[in-house]
């Protein structure tokens, strides 16, 4: 029976799956599952490096890099990305050109269109999705490793897309507008 | 290429359209080879498939997906001969790295390419091969084949599910081993298996 003295956390932990224990052994990521992820709306176009400390949904256009290593990134159906993405769980339902590094999982939805490489311990490509590139399911990839994976070091040069490195234009004020941290 | 076909042979399109599951002897050979514990590079010329991803992921492979099949020619059904010319692209994404593939999977794409397109595609791929690279593909022995490449799903344990993606048929090229070996330069036939469903499994190796 729940008592007033019981904290909400205790109650949640008592009902949770054993995976909760696994989570606790990880580096502290208090906002890894934030309930209200930040959203880049469909009319927003962003060029440059984007980093932050909360989950993100991209419905607009992003060109550059997206680095939310401890957090979840979702590219909505309207999203158009030309960037490498680093994250925890990454879901792609829109169009994306670039490499994807996830410490937990990458899901490419049926509506997703990806041209680039994926590195993650778990990858799901839904039937009907469009994908050109490589999938490397390296189980040793963890959050700390994903943060060290840089396209120039491991994969951008390997990239089948042979895409040019995307750089924020000099003096561009939008280059850091998306920086949430 | 003109071939003589009997009336009986020409009346067998239905068999080519039956979905089936079968043990792939070619993939079993691949499985036996991929036991060294190193990372293997597999080039899948087909579209992304969760079955292939799981199968090769379990074998510590890096899967490169090319998705060479392109949208159908809207007039395909009106053409009797090679309406799919160009339906399967012979152009690979250029790679600027030193990737060398251990296995190339072409599924049944060669049924939909003329022999010069096969030769062109394979000459593009050759530079990413090294001695021992395997090439796996299927050729239909039926006179008629579906008008689009079929769907092959890896079910695990080298079981393949074959599912035609259309009910309309066209004449198939029925390439002979000799024709294929001539077109696929640098490779030679390692194994050739005739399956009960009328498909021939080829396993070539790069020399």
Image: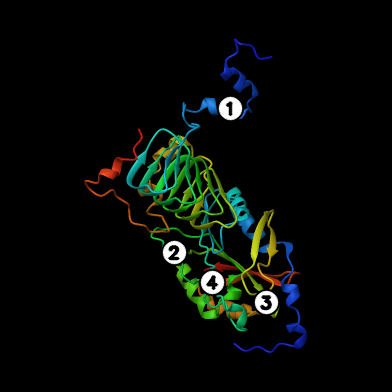
Determine contact: label 3, label 2, CB under 8 Å.
no
Find disc 1 in the rendering and name its residue: A20
Q: In 3D space, how far apart are the residues under numbered discs 4 and 3 (Cα atoms)? A: 17 Å
Badge 1 density bin: few <14, some 14–19, many ≥20, Cα 10 Å = few
Query: Circle 4 — which element?
Result: loop
Which one is in front, B25 or A27? Answer: A27
Determine the residue located farthest toward the top in the rendered image.
Answer: A5
Camera-side mark, 3 or 2: 3
Camera-side mark, 2 or 4: 4
Q: In 3D space, how far apart are the residues under numbered discs 2 and 4 (Cα atoms)? A: 14 Å
Q: In 3D space, how far apart are the residues under numbered discs 2 and 1 (Cα atoms)? A: 42 Å
Query: Circle 1 — which element?
Result: helix
Is disc 4 on the same chain as disc 2?
yes
Determine the residue located farthest toward the front in the rendered image.
Answer: A43
The tag earlier along the polypeptide, 4 or 3, is 4
Find disc 4 in the rendering and name its residue: B88
The location of residue B142, given as percent across then percent down, is 71, 77
Q: In 3D space, how far apart are the residues under numbered discs 3 and 2 (Cα atoms)? A: 30 Å
Find disc 3 in the rendering and name its residue: B169
Is disc 3 on the same chain as disc 1?
no
The subunit carrying tag 1 is A
Which image quadrant: the N terminus of chain A? Answer: top right
Q: Can residue B24 be seen in this view?
A: no
Instruction: Reply above or below: B131 against A66.
Output: below
Query: Circle 3 — which element?
Result: strand
User: Residue B148 occupies which quadrant of the picture?
Assistant: bottom right
Find disc 2 in the rendering and name its residue: B93
Q: In 3D space, how far apart are the residues under numbered discs 1 and 4 (Cα atoms)? A: 47 Å
Query: Circle 2 — which element?
Result: loop
The location of residue B118, given as percent across then percent down, is 53, 75
Which one is in front, A163 or B200? Answer: A163
Determine whether, in the image, residue A18 is placed left or right of residue B91: right
């Amino acid at each position: 029976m729940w008592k007033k003295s019981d904290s909400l956390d205790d109650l949640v932990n008592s009902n949770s799956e054993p995976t909760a224990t696994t989570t606790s052994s990880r580096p502290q990521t208090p906002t890894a599952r934030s309930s209200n992820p930040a959203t880049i709306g469909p009319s927003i176009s962003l060029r440059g490096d984007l980093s932050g400390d909360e989950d993100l949904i991209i419905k607009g256009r992003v060109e550059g890099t997206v680095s939310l290593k401890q957090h979840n990134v979702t590219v909505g159906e309207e999203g158009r990305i030309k960037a490498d993405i680093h994250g925890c769980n990454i879901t792609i339902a829109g169009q994306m050109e670039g490499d994807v590094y996830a410490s937990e999982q990458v899901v490419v939805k049926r509506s997703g269109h990806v041209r680039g490489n994926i590195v993650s311990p778990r990858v799901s490509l839904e039937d009907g999705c469009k994908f050109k590139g490589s999938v490397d399911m390296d189980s040793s990839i963890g959050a700390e490793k994903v943060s060290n994976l840089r396209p120039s070091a491991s994969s951008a040069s390997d990239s089948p897309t042979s895409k040019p490195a995307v750089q924020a234009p000099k003096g561009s004020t939008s280059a850091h507008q998306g920086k949430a941290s | 290429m003109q071939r003589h076909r009997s009336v009986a042979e020409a009346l067998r399109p239905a068999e080519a359209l039956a979905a089936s599951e079968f043990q792939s002897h070619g993939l079993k050979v691949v499985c036996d080879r991929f036991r060294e514990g190193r990372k293997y590079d597999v080039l899948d010329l087909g579209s992304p498939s969760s079955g292939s991803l799981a199968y090769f992921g379990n074998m510590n492979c890096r899967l490169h997906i090319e998705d060479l099949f392109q949208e159908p020619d809207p007039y395909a059904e009106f053409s009797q001969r090679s309406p799919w010319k160009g339906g399967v692209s012979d152009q690979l994404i250029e790679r600027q790295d030193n990737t060398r593939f251990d296995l190339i999977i072409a599924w049944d794409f060669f049924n939909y390419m003329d022999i010069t397109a096969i030769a062109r595609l394979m000459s593009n791929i050759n530079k990413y091969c090294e001695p021992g690279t395997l090439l796996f593909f299927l050729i239909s022995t039926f006179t008629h084949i579906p008008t689009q490449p079929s769907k092959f799903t890896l079910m695990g344990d080298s079981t393949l599910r074959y599912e035609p993606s259309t009910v309309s048929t066209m004449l198939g090229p029925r390439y002979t081993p000799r024709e294929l070996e001539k077109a696929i330069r640098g490779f030679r036939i390692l194994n050739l298996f005739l399956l009960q469903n009328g498909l021939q499994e080829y396993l070539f190796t790069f020399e």
